[in-house]
Amino acid sequence: MDEILNGKAVLVVDDTAVIRMLVADILAPVGVRILEADGGERGMAQYRSAPIIFVTAVDQREVLQWAFEAGADDFIQKPLHAMVLRRRLGNLLQKAAYLKQLESMSQSPRR
């Protein structure tokens, strides 16, 4: 799964520099290039079509519903575990690659 992450850029958004550094320490060893933002507005300014994983210590249904409505693709509850973050991010990136491949196949002229 780590090979899927190698060479990808990931935007890490958190208002706490220590959390951004923790995520970078987990992802950088498998070849992920880390981009950082210290808040939601700055993060969304860089957002394109990348998967969004919401990391939270809160286990309230309303907060998680808000996260999904805001565009999150998945969420991970704190404390953050390296294997869980890498696996879920890898799964989302693999899904995005498959969707892109399907889109290009459907747009290709048929013979």
Image (cartoon, grey):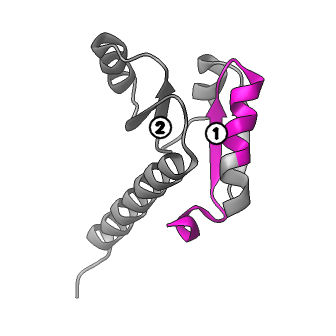
User: In which quadrant will I find the C terminus?
Assistant: bottom left
- Callout 2 crowding tier (Cα within 10 Å): few <14, some 14–19, many ≥20: many
Q: Residue at left 72%, top 41%?
A: 35
The verdict on residue 39 being magenta is no
Q: Measured from the top left, where is residue 95 in percent x and y?
A: 37, 58
What x and y, as percent, mark residue 44?
57, 27
Along the viewing direction, whichever of 27 and 9 lies nearer the viewer: 27
Residue 98: which quarter of the image? Answer: bottom left
- Per the rendering, the mark at residue 52 is 2
> Could you say whether the residue bearing mark 2 is in a helix, strand or loop?
loop
- Residue furthest toward the left? 111
The reply to whether residue 31 is visible in this rendering is: no
- Residue type (three-letter) at the residue carrying disc 1: Leu
Q: Position of residue 97 (x, y in %)?
A: 43, 63
Provide the residue span drawn in magenta.
Answer: 1-25
Mark closer to the chain start, 2 or 1? 1
Q: Amino acid at mark 2?
A: Ile
Q: Circle 1 is placed at which residue position?
A: 11
Q: Is residue 15 magenta?
A: yes
Image side of residue 59 versus residue 23, left or right: left
Give the Cα distance between marks 2 and 1.
9 Å
Q: Residue at x 32, y 63 (%)?
A: 103
Give the residue at x 63% y 46%. Answer: 10
10 shown above or below 95: above
> Dividing the picture into quarters, in which one does residue 18 lie?
top right
- Secondary element type, mark 1: strand
Q: Residues within 10 Å of mark 1 (few under 14, many from 20)?
A: some
Residue, far bottom: 111
Quick check: 41 left or right of 22? left
